[in-house]
Image (cartoon, rainbow, N blue to C red):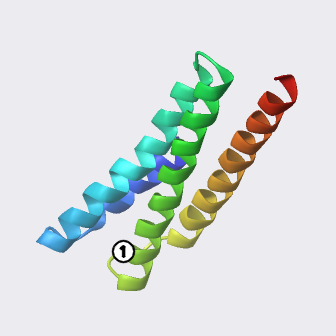
Amino acid sequence: MGLAVAAVRFAAQLPRDPAGRHVASQLVRAASGGGANYEEARAAESRDDFVHKVGIAAKEVREAAFWLELIRRSGWVTGDLQAAIREAAELAAILGASARTARAHASTRR
């Protein structure tokens, strides 16, 4: 949830022009979507369902990292964007590894 909270805080600092609103919306959607999809994965109905939902969570978190990097490069926000970018990269790696592990375990059981 830390990434989603950081995204909400950074989004609130973005300009209220069309570009700023677009980036803010995309950032909050991607960062919160990653956490929401992970929660869905925890309640998955099958291993395949888990792999699918964790994979989506990883994609969302990678997208959040993209928007954070765009904000950093734009100079729109002051604050420790680098820590949030690093957290997003770490979460994406963890989620991706979790999906690969679950997929590998599924193929050995069949």
Q: Position of residue 110 (x, y in %)?
A: 81, 23
In the rendered image, the residue lying farthest to the right is: 108
**Residue 87: x, y in percent?**
62, 58
* 21 sits to left or right of 57: left
Q: Quadrant of residue 49?
A: top right
Q: Nearer the viewer, residue 44 or 1?
A: 44
Question: Three-letter amino acid code at disc 1?
Answer: Val
Side of 82 where 107 appears, left or right: right
Which quadrant would residue 55 be assigned to in this image?
top right
Camera-nearest residue between 42 and 6: 42
- What residue appears at the point 56 percent right and 66 percent down from the top-left corner? 85
x, y percentage for residue 45? 58, 15
- Residue 32 seen by the camera: yes
Q: Residue furthest top?
A: 45
Image location of residue 84, percent across then percent down: 55, 62
Q: How many marks?
A: 1
Q: Is residue 67 above or below residue 109?
A: below
Q: Specify the farthest residue to the front.
A: 110
Mark 1, other Cα within 10 Å: few <14 / some 14–19 / many ≥20: some
Residue that appears at 40% across and 67% down:
67
Element on which disc 1 rests: loop
Name the residue rendered at 63%, 18% in the picture: 46
Residue 87 to residue 96: above or below = below
Residue 13, image quadrant: bottom left
Q: Name the side, left or right, on which 83 lies relative to 35.
A: right
Q: Nearer the viewer, residue 81 or 35?
A: 35
Residue appearing at x 81%, y 38% in the figure: 104
Q: Which residue is mark 1?
A: 77
